[in-house]
Image (cartoon, grey):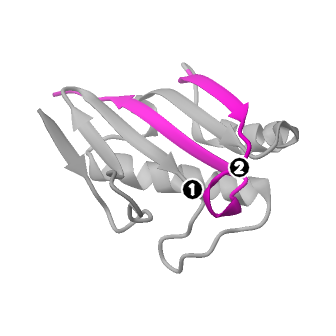
């Protein structure tokens, strides 16, 4: 059985997908663009975009009764690998050991010309 997770504290889905889905003891958070849910704006620098993407994911996890401490896997999509170092600095502010497993790679283009998009899988007690 799967349960849709939805919160106004993160940007709404703009297509046929959910902000997140809980299945068993796993929460699958869709890729979060760095869109401020309050006004729809997006910062210009990679650090502010990374922070907003992580704040959006954090809000979704909290709506699911979870937190960043429960994240077991992240995937980071970057517009360019030259952004990796600055993204990683901000990312390190949000996680502590034991860190989630992670994959990060550059893609040709992200929606809305974003510099970063981050998806997550979290584990939670049933």
Look at the image and give the residue range highlighted in magenta. Answer: 99-126
User: Camera-side residue: 84 or 105?
Assistant: 105
| Residue plotted at (57% across, 32% down) | 75
- Residue 118, percent from left and from top: 57, 43
Task: Tell me the CA gap for discs 2 and 1.
Answer: 12 Å
| Residue plotted at (46% across, 49% down) | 57
**Is residue 47 shown left or right of residue 28?**
right
Say which residue label 1 marks: 33
| Residue plotted at (76% across, 46% down) | 79
Give me the disc on residue 123: none
Q: Is residue 55 above or below residue 70?
A: below
Kindly report which numbered mark, 2 or 1, lies closer to the viewer in this rendering.
2
**Local crowd at mark 2 within 10 Å, few (<14), some, or many (≥20)?**
some
Q: Is residue 28 above or below residue 11?
A: above
Callout 1 secondary element = loop
- Residue 17, percent from left and from top: 34, 51
User: Camera-side residue: 29 or 93?
Assistant: 29
Say which residue label 2 marks: 109
Q: Quadrant of residue 72?
A: top left
Magenta-colored stretch includes residue 116: yes
**Is residue 116 shown left or right of residue 10?**
right
**Local crowd at mark 1 within 10 Å, few (<14), some, or many (≥20)?**
many
Q: Quadrant of residue 13?
A: bottom left
- Residue 58, percent from left and from top: 45, 49
N-term-proximal mark, 2 vs 1: 1
């Amino acid at each position: 059985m799967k349960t849709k997770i939805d919160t106004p504290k993160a940007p709404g889905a703009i297509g046929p997908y959910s902000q997140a889905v809980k299945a068993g003891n796993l929460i699958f958070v869709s890729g979060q663009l760095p869109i401020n849910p309050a006004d729809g704006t997006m910062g210009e620098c990679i650090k502010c975009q990374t922070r907003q993407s992580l704040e959006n994911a954090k809000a979704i996890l909290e709506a699911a009764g979870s937190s960043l401490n429960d994240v077991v896997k992240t995937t980071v999509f970057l517009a360019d690998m030259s952004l990796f170092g600055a993204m990683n600095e901000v990312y390190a502010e949000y996680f502590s050991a034991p860190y989630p497993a992670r994959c990060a790679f550059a893609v040709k283009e992200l929606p809305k010309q974003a510099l970063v998009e981050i998806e997550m899988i979290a584990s939670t007690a049933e």
